[in-house]
Amino acid sequence: MMKLEGALFPWRFRLVVGLLGIMVAAIAWRIIDLQVVDRAFLKGQGDARSVRHIPIPAHRGLITDRNGEPLAVSTPVTTLWGNAKEMQTAKEKWPALAAALGQDPKALAERLEAQANKEFIYLVRGLTPEQGQAVLDLKVPGVYGIEEFRRFYPAGEVTAHMVGFTDIDDHGREGVELAYDEWLAGVPGKRQVIKDRRGRLIKDVQVTKNAKAGKPLALSIDLRLQYLANRELRNAIIENGAKAGSLVIMDVKTGEILAMVNQPTYNPNNRRNLQPAMMRNRAMIDVFEPGSTMKAISMSAAIETGRWKPTDTVEVYPGTLQIGKYTIKDVSKSEGPVLDLTGILINSSNVGMSKVAFDIGGETIFRLAQKVGLGQDTGLGFPGERVGNLPNYREWRKAETATLSYGYGISVTAIQLVHAFSALANNGRLAPLTLIKTDKAPQTTQVLPEAVAKTMQTMLQQVIEAPRGVFRAQVPAYHVGGKSGTARKTSVGTKGYAENSYRSLFAGFGPMNDPRYAIVVVIDEPTKAGYFGGLVSAPVFSKVMSGTLRLMNITPDNLPATQQANAAPVVPLKANGGRG
Ligand code: 59J
């Protein structure tokens, strides 16, 4: 075969072998050339053109109030960054850049020179896309843009504690923004790009993963009530020269928090000059002794035993009661030496309450307090939320029993206190608390017999409407009920109570014909016009409850007879004015 072919085409065979030989030699030379001679050059080129993945920001979910009013909105912004190394090649363009950025040209030049070997520096973050494009249109070498989102809080300081805020990288840092971060955040996407060594985009290759937008969140709060609560609390803090305060409004039937405000507050859109005191969501993260507001719970426990009814009496004379070396004192002189249970609440008698408590035992009060959520986990999972403390003693001696019955030796948050009162308002049924709008009726727990809750509603209405009652808590056109409290603050450092610093409290609900809203007002260290809860906090309750009932279109249950006549439908005028 070989011989035959060789004999037939000897010149062709030699030609092919020769060509192959030349090709092999050329390839070998090329390999040596690439691997040895040009190695350094090519390696540099390879590094310079590399595939990178850059994140595509995910749109963060919108936070709204219960009626769809925006509370936290993500808007697209452009962040401009510079490759300072590259920027050194076009210093003549810096003044125009500074002008477009609204920065001092000298300061910018100094900064760029000081960081001349940095390949990434922020020039300005969070411009509107139009502003950003205007700067990019200058085509300054080394200046690039990234698309980001920035959070804006339309209601500012009014919803600050509740909503919280995100950090500059759009991660939740406080409040609902933090508690629901995963729900709101979404998942960033990825874009494959080819960039050169200086970070210049050479080619936008493809989107390898689409960004997944975060989910929207409708809170339980009603922005109108939030504004109302904030305004009235702020005014009261100023008028009373108080240090701080909280106010919570709850829908007792659904468990929804309709408003939650604190003073002092802050503007989440401008967080420069923030002091830690402004950032505290006190209604959930500060605990306090509930003082006499606790008597509403202790009295409920007494009536639930069946051993006591509202008209049963107790001797409170002479306004003090000695328990070992501990003296129980009534602050105000009671209307008589003997008070019935309603009278104990109206006169806020610590002595009377203690005597009832000795009869039913501290543990009875403890158990109900526990059931209505005092000193218990709310399940809300709000960042920094406190649980408070409801101590259980192996042996409830008189001192512990008395102290708990009128609200000391226990610590609660404002939100727990409003929750406890909601059980009385909702006929003994406790709805779990929520900060999220709910559409279906919640599963409630009967924590107190309906009849007992109804008895308490009547008594707490008397606390406000009786001749010696807390008239400042009254609401025009509606019947409401509640309990004031004035608690000496524990003084820091010592074990005892401060002589001159108080917490003024009010907890109540309405309207009494079908209680719907519970409100708690806490005013911390009032220093001007007195400090009694009935004086300082009750008027705030009145104004906020009044506004709430009106805004929510609740039919008045206490109209004077003449107004009721007016409210009745009148014969409408005929369209032509009655002329035929
Ligand atoms: C009080 C307390 C402190 C703790 C006392 C208020 C006790 C007590 C030890 C002295 C002012 C004051 C455990 S006052 O809340 O009784 O607003 O409707 O702070 O009693 O034993 O100069 N409330 N307040 N007591 N401590 N320890 C009354 C009452 C209450 C009122 C006013 C008058 C106290 C009508 C409180 C209100 O019901």
Image (cartoon, rainbow, N blue to C red):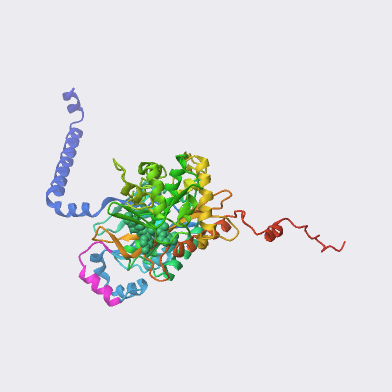
Q: Is residue 207 above or below residue 246?
A: above
Q: Residue at x 32, y 47 (%)?
A: 398
Q: Residue at x 41, y 68 (%)?
A: 530
Q: Position of residue 516 (x, y in %)?
A: 54, 50
* Residue 150 appears in the figure: no
Pick the front one: 174 or 433: 433
Q: In which quadrant of the rendered image does the C terminus lie?
A: bottom right
Q: Is residue 100 above or below residue 571?
A: below
Residue 111 colored magenta? yes
* Residue 579 appears in the figure: yes
Q: Quadrant of residue 575?
A: bottom right
> Magenta part of the protein: which range?
105-121
Q: Position of residue 291 (x, y in %)?
A: 38, 55
Residue extending farthest right: 580
Residue extending farthest top: 1
Pick the front one: 435 or 185: 435
Q: Position of residue 213 (x, y in %)?
A: 42, 49
Q: Is residue 400 above or below residue 543?
A: above
Pick the front one: 530 or 188: 530
Q: Residue at x 37, y 45 (%)?
A: 358
Is 185 on the left or on the right of 40, as rendered? right
Q: In which quadrant of the rendered image does the N terminus lie?
A: top left
Q: Quadrant of residue 116?
A: bottom left
Classify the position of ligand 1 by quadrant: top left, top right, bottom left or bottom right: bottom left
Pick the front one: 195 or 26: 195
Residue 151 colored magenta? no
Q: Position of residue 58 (x, y in %)?
A: 39, 51
